[in-house]
Image (cartoon, rainbow, N blue to C red):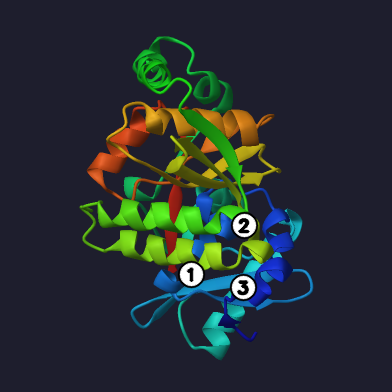
Amino acid sequence: MEFQRFTVKEYSRLEPYFHLRVGRACEEQILSQYIWKELYDTSICIEEEVAYLRIKSGTKYYYFLPFCKEEKLSYYLSKLKSYVNETLNDKLRLYLVEEKYLESLDLREEEYNIVTNVDWEDYVYDYEKLAKLSGKKYHKKKNHVNAFLKQYEGRYEYATLTIEHKQEIEEFLIGWYENKVSEDAYMRLDNEAEGLKRVLNHLSQIKPIMAGIYIDGVLQAFTMGSYNKEQQMAMIHIEKANDKIRGLYPFINQQFLLHEMEGCKYVNREDDMGLLSLRKAKESYHPIEKVKKYMVIQR
């Protein structure tokens, strides 16, 4: 196996492999991998039927489950294990494995140290409930949206964004990040900003789904996502809004789903990174489930 850095040149070649098996986690989406590739020093190895991804933490390598057809996953995992054990003389470390694979791949605690953390869990929501904000649970969200609509009637515009809006998006994001005070000790917000900049510089190759809300002709909210067709799941990778404008966050959330993700059943809004403010925000939308993930490290 030969691993090389994950650059935009490999994006279109790598993308089909992400659809070979039906993962639900945000790490199973190529756009998410590309946004965070510099933070994790991501490298890839592409073969005929399989793609391998690995990241680096300190001096240690961690691998994602091979991206291949479900029925061949066990075979290619065994091949990866042999490469790590025999060629690299190292232990196999699997990064954020979805719970369903622990049993199907027979990853047993006699051979592996298996740990999980609530900080790693993705929040999954019912599409209809989020798109319509129906029911008592969403009463407060709907009130905020109605307040926004009343205050900005005739002044706002929803827009699907493309490469033609690149400069406006960049200007909005610069302002958003400059005004944001993060509680994250790992400075992941800085890496997110850099990752977004990379995506925006290569929109012709990557083609994410993007939208925004303009108020008085100025972009005040921006979101970026992708569609997991195998799971009928909308993946929300980025959502930023002027938090001084009441109701703008729930409004862009709702409108993005209605305009860009019609026909979905589920919405994955990713994990909360262990940040309490982000956890509170994600819980306020009432997830129907969470995608549990595990570190699986060979003993």
Tags 1 and 2 touching, CB below 8 Å: no
Label 1, residues with CA under 10 Å away: few <14, some 14-19, many ≥20: some
Mark carried by residue 37: 1
Pick whichever, 44 or 130, lies toward us. Answer: 130
Query: Compared with residue 203, is residue 165 higher up or lower down, i.e. above or below?
Result: above
Query: Compared with residue 298, is residue 173 higher up or lower down, i.e. above or below?
Result: above
Residue at horizontal 60 percent and vertical 28 percent from the top: 258
Pick whichever, 250 or 246, lies toward us. Answer: 246
Pick whichever, 171 or 256, lies toward us. Answer: 171
Amino acid of disc 2: Ile
Residue hosting label 3:
8
Q: Secondary structure at mark 1?
A: helix
Amino acid of disc 3: Val
Q: Nearer the viewer, mark 3 or mark 2?
A: 2
Label 3, residues with CA under 10 Å away: few <14, some 14-19, many ≥20: some
Q: Secondary structure at mark 2?
A: helix
Residue hosting label 2:
163
State how far apart marks 1 and 3 are (Cα): 11 Å
Residue at horizontal 63 percent and vertical 86 percent from the top: 2
The quarter in which the N terminus is drawn is bottom right
Q: Earlier in the sequence, mark 1 or mark 3?
A: 3
